[in-house]
Image (cartoon, rainbow, N blue to C red):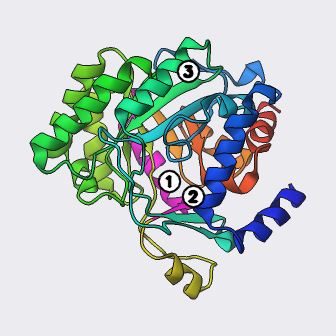
Amino acid sequence: MAVYDSLFRHVAVRVPAERTHRIGLRALAAATPVLPERAPDPSLAVTAMGLEFPSPLGVAAGYDKDAEGVRGLARLGFGAVEIGTVTARPQPGNPRPRLFRLPDDRALVNRMGFNNAGADAVAERLASLRAAGPLGTVLGVNIGKSKAAAGPDQTVADYRYSARVLGPYADYVVVNVSSPNTPGLRDLQGVDALEPLLSAVRAEIGATPLLVKITADLDDDGVDAVADLAVGLGLDGVVATNTTVARTGLASAPAAVEAAGTGGLSGAPLVEPARAVLARLVARVGGRLTIVSVGGISDAAEARRRLEAGATLVQAYTGFVYGGPAWPSRVNAELAA
């Protein structure tokens, strides 16, 4: 861990974050056939939404947008891999640079803008993955709004198309309405806009488990409203939380924070907001929904704390980036112990 941390800090000041990510993901995909399988201890298995998760620890959406590294991530020990966010139409995302490290906070700032190959291309890749045999992990598909989709009708049709094309290959589907990097997306968290959207996606995917992903920036009333809607519509769960636009309490120098600019902040600074949303959800819905807790999970102790607080499953992205390829198996081993 000390060697990886030293190397990470060396790279962090020399290689742009997005380039490092692309190199790492491609290397993982290329090395998959020879990677040793780090299967989680059987004691960690979790049954949720009618699915068997080898471990409660999953990799959050955003790490593998186009399903390029699913088998490799499974071999590293993740009990679930949530790909995406995928949009109906392929799109390049926002101008670069758009991903930044804040090492002093073990955090990232991103304004990627849902860059992805589009639903058709990702569906073709998932079909090949499924045809090649068991994945060794649970596969989630996270779908979002194409930037070009304007107005309520186009937005619903956009999500509906992604659900129709990708749903047959997903173990579960997540509707993402919480990224801060697509104009107007967070407005969809209001129940008036969210209800027809979720109903349309449900109609496309049938019995496949359906969840909604919310932001850390929702107030208590907003969390309650989404939770009540999820129960009322018969959703299977809530993923909480996405990144935050807040920049309070950071250890990084103000100049570094300013240089990173706008976008969603992830990593250790999200611990308290994510815990607060989790507590609110647990109090509101109890055991009626699967709750996937995300945000600031950097070690087994934090993962355990979320599970003990009522989360069914946990996910990480930034903790994995800072922790390195051995991180998921280490967290699994410490959870099992």
What residue is rendered at 53% in x and 37% in y?
A: 310
Tally of marks: 3
Residue 83 at least partly seen: yes
What residue is rendered at 73% in x and 44% in y?
A: 300
Q: Nearer the viewer, residue 82 or 267?
A: 82
Q: Distance between the Cα atoms at labels 3 and 1? A: 33 Å
What residue is rendered at 33% in x and 55% in y?
A: 220
| Residue 98 drawn above or below residue 236 | below
- Region in magenta: 264-289
For label 2, the crowd category at 10 Å Cα-Cα, with few meaning under 14, some 14 to 19 and many 20 or more, is some
| Residue 293 drawn above or below residue 180 | above
Does label 3 or label 1 sit earlier along the sequence? 3
Point out the image quarter for the C terminus: top right
CB atoms of marks 1 and 2 within 8 Å: yes
Residue 124 at x, y percent in the picture: 44, 25
For label 1, the crowd category at 10 Å Cα-Cα, with few meaning under 14, some 14 to 19 and many 20 or more, is many
Residue 221 at x, y percent in the picture: 27, 53
Q: Distance between the Cα atoms at labels 1 and 2? A: 5 Å
